[in-house]
Amino acid sequence: MTENTYTPAALDRSATVYVAGHRGLVGGAILRKLQDEGFTNIVTRTHAELDLTDRKAVFDFFAETKPVYVFLAAAKVGGILANNTYPYDFISKNLQIQVNVMDAALEQGVDRLLFLGSSCIYPKLADQPITEDALLTGYLEETNDAYAIAKIAGILQVQAARRQHGVHWISAMPTNLYGPGDNFSPKGSHVLPALIRRYDEAVANGTEVVTNWGTGSPRREFLHVDDMAAACLHLMEHYDGPQQVNVGTGTDTTIKEVAETIADIVGYTGKVEWDTTKPDGTPQKLLDVSKLKGEGFVPQYDLRSGLEHTIQWFHQNKDSIRE
Ligand code: NDP
């Protein structure tokens, strides 16, 4: 079957929507967004209730709930260390989750599905800012290549479902995300929540020197997860095409500037040292977001307001954040 002409439109607020991974950073934000937008029939299952690697359970769940729309934000996700240590788990679990959910969605005739990947699908040495066309043009970053290959397979699966079955499924590739629900644990957290926690604890403990990893010079792009969720809904309502869409702000900041902004917000006035014996990683990582902009989406948070919002959430939820 070939792709037919189709114009995406507003999603039906009373139709059944399945948000996979609703307790995660992204899935949680999508759930809040859909609730705010008046969706009345959102179905969710925790990992304990439905293990998405259990193929039969996934098929039974889809047959029972018959979702009309699916946001696939469940994945085995981790930082460099976890990806590097457990590459088999990252490729195997993510492939299983994607294949099971998409096969079951196909069986139930789900016509609108959004698959979430990550900017690590792009080649390590891709030109900056990275356009969608950079996919499959070079070698991947070795530390997370197994995870990235699973995500690339997901994009291809979406494209193949469109070609063979005529469904209107799409893929979105977010940049680094942060916000309420993030992982602030010292072991598992990404750079931004790690910095927030470090500076916040320094203020609470009266620490005089804070030491951060690397030189602080790498440039990174950060998107508030509520903007990510809004972009997901926007794409489901406005975009229909086989190519994945980058989701980011289109601007990047040095880690040093990010750290200074966090220090300013939490009120840290002590010394800051940079441990230059620790690796910096790639000097710049920035997505080209022209395609997303072309679809009419503009993020609401700049980095400072997004950080203020996240730090406020962190203060309110310190006792219950995931470790
Ligand atoms: P999280 O780890 O915060 O959330 C993932 C969710 O998926 C968790 O609720 C987790 O449940 C669930 N999950 C994992 N495995 C299974 C399973 N076998 N069965 C059922 N549920 C499962 O990840 P994020 O929200 O950060 O990421 C979601 C998506 O967004 C991913 O595809 C990721 O690649 C993408 N993304 C995220 C970025 C970021 O900066 N956070 C950046 C770019 C992309 P549990 O915790 O109970 O296992």
Image (spheres, grey):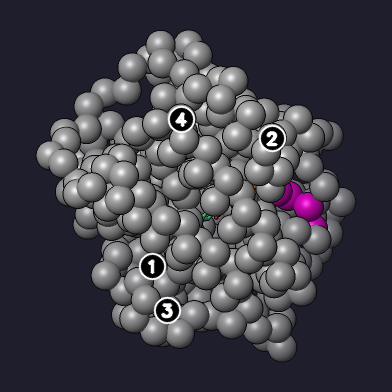
- Can residue 299 be spotted in the picture? no
Q: Nearer the viewer, mark 1 or mark 2?
A: 2
Q: Label 3, label 2: how many angstroms apart (C-alpha)?
A: 35 Å
In the rendered structure, which disc, 3 or 2, sits on the residue that comes first in sequence? 2
In percent of width and height, residue 83 lies at 69, 69
Farthest residue toward the front? Answer: 1
In the rendered structure, which disc, 1 or 2, sits on the residue that comes first in sequence? 2
In the rendered structure, which disc, 3 or 1, sits on the residue that comes first in sequence? 3
> Within the magenta stretch, is there residue 185?
yes
| SS at mark 1 in the image | loop
Question: Mark 4: which amino acid?
Answer: Gln
Identified at 60% across, 34% down, the residue is 59
The residue singled out by tag 4 in the image is 108
Q: Nearer the viewer, mark 3 or mark 1?
A: 3
Q: Which residues are magenta?
A: 182-186
The residue singled out by tag 1 in the image is 286
Q: Nearer the viewer, mark 3 or mark 4?
A: 4
Given contact means CB atoms under 8 Å apart, are the residues at marks 1 and 2 in contact? no
Q: Around disc 3, counting alpha carbons within 10 Å, would you say few (fewer than 14), some (14 to 19), or many (20 or more)?
A: some
- Can residue 134 be spotted in the picture? yes
